[in-house]
Amino acid sequence: MTNFVDQICKLGAHRIALISLGPVGCIPAKALLPSAPIDKCYGKMNKMVKNYNVGLENLVKRIPIKYPSSFAVYGAVYKTVQNFRANPKRYGFSDVTNACCGNGTLGGALQCGKKGYKLCANPNEYLFWDYFHPSEHTYNLISKTLWNGTYSQIRPVNLKTLANMTLIKH
């Protein structure tokens, strides 16, 4: 990621948003992993994701130091999705565990579109669309959070503020 940021800054990028990984250990596809628990998130995987996200946020903090005419923000999607999982009804979800489209354990054992898949009746009530991807409703909530969110959700400023910033070019 550092190499990518260096490349885009050298090409003239001034406003940069780096978005964290979500809780990958909670996706329905974990049903395909031999050692993953079915009844809860795969903690080992989420620990790796959290470590990556810490590094990503540290990179965001270094960007304006290394590239004084650039400014970066960190979108805390991991925390946002965990909030959805902790308070599903508040965000309009009836299911934050299973895939809407798929089949088998968690709807993650058979991919959406493969012979034998099933489709839920209310996709917008599911956190996950398929074995790996969030639903349209989830993406909508995440995008609104990144656009207008508070410091705990995206920092040091939200995307709306970033988009409207006047940066001094050196």
Image (cartoon, grey):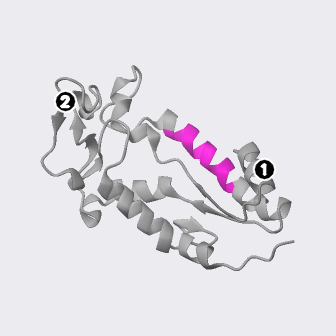
Q: Does the magenta stretch include residue 125?
A: no
Q: Is residue 49 magenta?
A: yes
Q: Say left or right for 27 vs 151.
A: left
Categorize mark 2 by other alpha carbons within 10 Å: few (<14), some (14-19), many (20+).
Answer: some
Residue carrying label 1: 6
Q: What residue is shown at x 21% (from left), y 50% (from top)?
A: 123
Percent position (x, y) of residue 27?
Answer: 37, 39
Badge 1 element? helix
Percent position (x, y) of residue 50?
Answer: 57, 46
**Lower position in the chain sequence, tag 1 or tag 2:** 1
Q: What residue is shown at x 54% (from left), y 75% (from top)?
A: 160
Categorize mark 1 by other alpha carbons within 10 Å: few (<14), some (14-19), many (20+).
Answer: some
Residue carrying label 2: 117
| Residue 144 versus residue 9 in the image, above or below | below
Residues in magenta, as a range: 46-57
Marks 1 and 2, how far apart at CA: 43 Å
